[in-house]
Image (cartoon, helix red, strand yellow):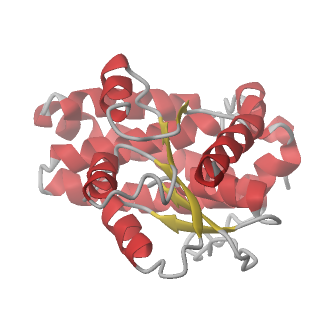
Amino acid sequence: MKDTNFLTANGVDLNKSLELFGDMETYDATLPDFLSGIKEKVEQLKTYKASADMQNYAIIVHSLKSDARYFGFMTLGDMAYQHEMQSKANDVNFIYANFDSLMLEAARVIKIVNMYLGEEDSSDSIISSPTTTVKDKKILVVDDSNVVISFVQKIFSNEYEVITATDGQQAISLIEEDKDDQIACVLLDIYMPNVNGFGVLEYFKSHNLFPKIPVSVITGAYTQEVIGMVKQYGIIDLLAKPFNEANVKDVVTRTINAKEI
């Protein structure tokens, strides 16, 4: 199908999305990762809601909010933002009272994406992540958003192997396995389930890894509090979400070059 009129008729803000993706070709290429990610996040939210785990609920719904806004699904993004704020306030009653509405909107978005991609009858199919060519040097992207991961992979697939982790513990394991010093830099999100970005920064600090593996932070929580906290560590740069291809290339170049100085 892939008719942009269908998207705009269903309330998708393509103009906002193209500020990030640049063109519809990149948007379309990344859309399956968004579809895969939203399904995964819906299941995680159900689990955290059932256990009243508001801390992890807030982290996942924050990621859902960001991904929805990247792709122009502003209604879902706004609803997810409300859930993020209320779960951070530990307002379990709000989450329970409004959860079905959030799930209905997520289901609507999934249906729209499936119809746009011409996959209306294959909503349960597993969409695998894109593969990357093995290079001598690696970029480690630590983020719980499949969209961000896929975006960085597509930008650098011809230059570096992009390896990924969706939480801090996975990132630390990959760093410990890097015996040949192939990781050229790390792009690190802050708010993730399990071990968050601050946990990774503390690991780097305690093991004196900042001179060896330069780190830049990428985050949607671009507040003075977060900026002040991350700048206490030896990071190279701080990039706010949403970002575009030029932003990411600039940050990665500066971060990798910092290792060579």
x, y percentage for residue 180?
54, 81
Above or below, 164 relative to 177? above
Instruction: Please say whether residue 224 is visible from this viewpoint.
Output: yes
- Residue at far front of view: 261
Where residue 82 sits, quadrant-wise, is top left
Q: Quick one: 134 or 126, which is closer to the camera?
A: 134
Picture quadrant of residue 23 = top right
Front position in the image: 70 or 245: 245
Residue 143: x and y in percent read 47, 54
Q: Residue furthest top?
A: 224
Rendered position, 103 above or below 17:
below
Quarter of the image where the N terminus is located: bottom right
Going 76% across and 77% down the picture, which residue do you hit?
Answer: 133
Image side of residue 68 versus residue 104, left or right: right
Residue 183 falls left or right of residue 89: right
The residue positioned 64% from the left and 34% from the top of the image is 243
User: Total label count?
Assistant: 0
Q: Is residue 32 left or right of residue 140?
A: right
- Residue 195: x and y, percent? 26, 57
Inspect this view and state whether residue 3 appears: no
Q: Nearer the viewer, residue 126 or 164?
A: 164
Q: Residue at x 29, y 61 (%)?
A: 207
- Residue 228, how many percent across, how many down? 33, 24
Q: Residue at x 84, y 36 (%)?
A: 5
